[in-house]
Image (cartoon, grey):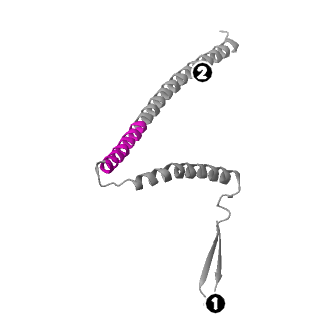
């Protein structure tokens, strides 16, 4: 981020910051994808919520139907929060299990590598012993 300091008429320093280097190009590929996904989400939610709210606003809520709609909405909110929390717990459990499996596999691979390295070192040592001149006494 570039910063320029200049004095104004009163002698005070005014700092301007150039943010063009850190901001993504709105016409670039990531800006275009972001705008497309945002637009899709916006118009999808607007297309669902606007007609729904028009119908709900037309219904008088100070009666049994209105109370049922309010209670059902709150129950759906609680259920979706509980479902989200259980999905998060499930994802964390799967992640932990995969992590443990990976650690076990990595440990087994490391043990096998060490066995192969030991056998190669033993072969080199035997070759060195066989190649060494024998001492004549």
Residue 9 figure quarter: bottom right
Near-viewer residue (58 or 104): 58
* Disc 1 packing (10 Å; few <14; some 14–19; many ≥20): few
* Residue closest to the eye, 113 or 14: 14
How far from the left and from the top, in percent, is residue 82?
Answer: 36, 40
27, 20: nearer the viewer? 27
Counting from the top left corner in percent of width and height, residue 69 is at 35, 47
Please report the residue visible at 41 percent of the width from the left and 52 percent of the height from the top: 56
Instruction: Report helix, strand or loop for mark 1.
Output: loop
Residue extent of the magenta highlight = 65-88
Q: Which residue is mark 1?
A: 9
Residue 130 visible at all: yes
Rendered position, 86 above or below 30: above
Report the mark closest to the observer, 1 or 2: 1
Magenta part, dominant SS: helix
Residue 133 appears in view:
no
Q: Nearer the viewer, residue 107 or 7?
A: 7
Which quadrant holds residue 94?
Answer: top left
- Numbered tag placed on residue 117 in the rendering: 2
Give me the disc on residue 70.
Answer: none
Q: Is residue 29 left or right of residue 118?
A: right
Q: In the image, is residue 135 above or below residue 4?
A: above
Q: Quadrant of residue 125?
A: top right
Q: Residue at x 57, y 19 (%)?
A: 118
């Amino acid at each position: 981020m570039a910063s320029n300091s200049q004095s104004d008429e009163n002698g005070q320093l005014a700092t301007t910051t150039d943010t063009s280097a850190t901001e993504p190009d709105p016409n670039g590929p990531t800006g275009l994808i972001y705008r497309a996904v945002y637009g899709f989400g916006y118009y999808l939610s607007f297309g669902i919520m606007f007609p729904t709210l028009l119908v709900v606003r037309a219904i008088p809520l100070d009666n049994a139907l209105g109370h049922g709609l309010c209670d059902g909405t709150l129950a759906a909110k609680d259920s979706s929060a509980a479902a989200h929390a259980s999905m998060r717990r499930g994802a964390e459990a799967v992640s932990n299990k995969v992590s443990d499996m990976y650690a076990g596999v990595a440990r087994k691979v490391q043990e096998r590598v060490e066995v192969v390295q030991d056998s190669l070192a033993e072969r080199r040592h035997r070759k060195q012993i066989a190649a060494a001149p024998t001492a004549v006494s």
